[in-house]
Image (tube, rainbow, N blue to C red):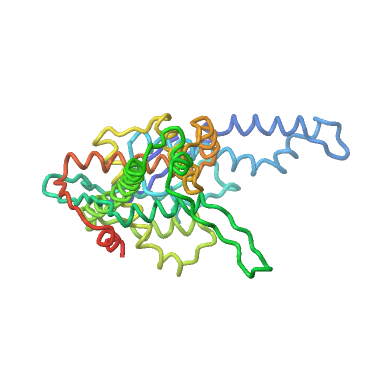
Amino acid sequence: MKIEQSELKDLMAVVSVTIEPADYQEEVAKQLKQVRQKAQMPGFRPGMVPAGLIKKMYGKGILADVLNKLVGENLQKHIEDNKLQILGEPLPNENGKIDLDNEDTFTFQFDIAVAPEFDAKLNGKNKLPEYTIEPTDEMINKQIEAYTNRFGEYIPEDKEKGTKAEVKPCAVDAELFAKVYGADAPKDEAGFRAKVKEDIVRSLAEETKYRFGIDAKAAILKKMEKVAFPEEFLKRWVLATNEKMTAEELEKDFPKMIEELKWHLAKDQLMKEYNINVEKEEVEDFAKRIAKMQFMQYGLMNVEDAMLANYAQEMLKNEDQLRGIVERLVEDKIFEALKGIAKVEPKTVSQEDFDKLFK
């Protein structure tokens, strides 16, 4: 067997895999023998169908399977041995046609595309804003009002009096404090307001953290805006692997695909640069945080840790959710690392002005 690669040109090359009879004959003969032992055909005893007939009926299909397996394994080995960071997957070259009927030595050719060289790292010259939102009294009052409504008294409809069903807000007292915060409930209204403010601050911290990530990602992609890709190959690969996608849909979505590809490559580079890894315990803890926030949306502020852990484990059984959590943790670690590298500029803004950043 022989594998050759042409010289890279515009990030593309052709890999040729040549397979000779000695590479496949033994395996083909082995599989033909196995088929013959199991074959049942009218006029012949089980396992006694002539070998020539078995070869005529099944030989070409078995040969094709063996060749495909050999090509796939050795093509992958070539990519790994040469540390090629390929884009997409190898695609059959239009010149690599195989004649199973009249040849015994076969040369398969594949087009490959490799990732361009780039530098996604930021430095002290890159400015990144880090926002802080101070909760206002109005925000605290609105949150307390939401609690009094949520834990208020339900008044049913009274047709005789012509009244509709409604919820009467509860009092802001120790009973409400306990319903919201359980055993850790504050003792008075001042403590309750302080606790509510802490919750809002935590919530806002997640928002500002998310915004920092948006700005950091934008700065990284800006460094990569002139990085060129073998677009025709990528379009061909996308269409080959997405049968339902039309050429028109591809042209429309392609710019976004390139941005996603840039970000994927940038993350890989930065993970290596900053020695970033994601541990199993971190994934589980993050899933528990998601579960806790979901419970909080329903007013359940003090869910037991065991229940959170069970919900988290169920969540992680979903491969898409697991992948999403790992990617989020990787991005969070990259953004945190950038805080010690780029020039971070603290900015205090109102909630209104902060919200305008997303418009």
Q: Is residue 56 left or right of residue 120?
A: right
- Going 68% across and 34% down the picture, which residue do you hit? 32
Q: Is residue 209 left or right of residue 294?
A: left
**Percent from the top left, x then y, of residue 175?**
47, 41
Q: Is residue 308 visible?
A: yes
Q: Quadrant of residue 123?
A: top left
Asked if 9 appears above or below 191 in the picture, the reply is below
- Residue 79 or 229: which is nearer the viewer? 229
**Percent from the top left, x then y, of residue 11?**
29, 51
Q: Quadrant of residue 307?
A: top right
Q: Is residue 311 left or right of residue 352?
A: right
**Percent from the top left, x then y, of residue 156?**
63, 59
- Going 41% across and 39% down the picture, which residue do you hit? 326
Farthest residue to the front: give it. Answer: 161
Q: Is residue 323 visible?
A: no
- Going 49% across and 56% down the picture, which residue do you hit? 240
Q: Quadrant of the N terminus?
A: top left
Q: Is residue 55 left or right of residue 318?
A: right
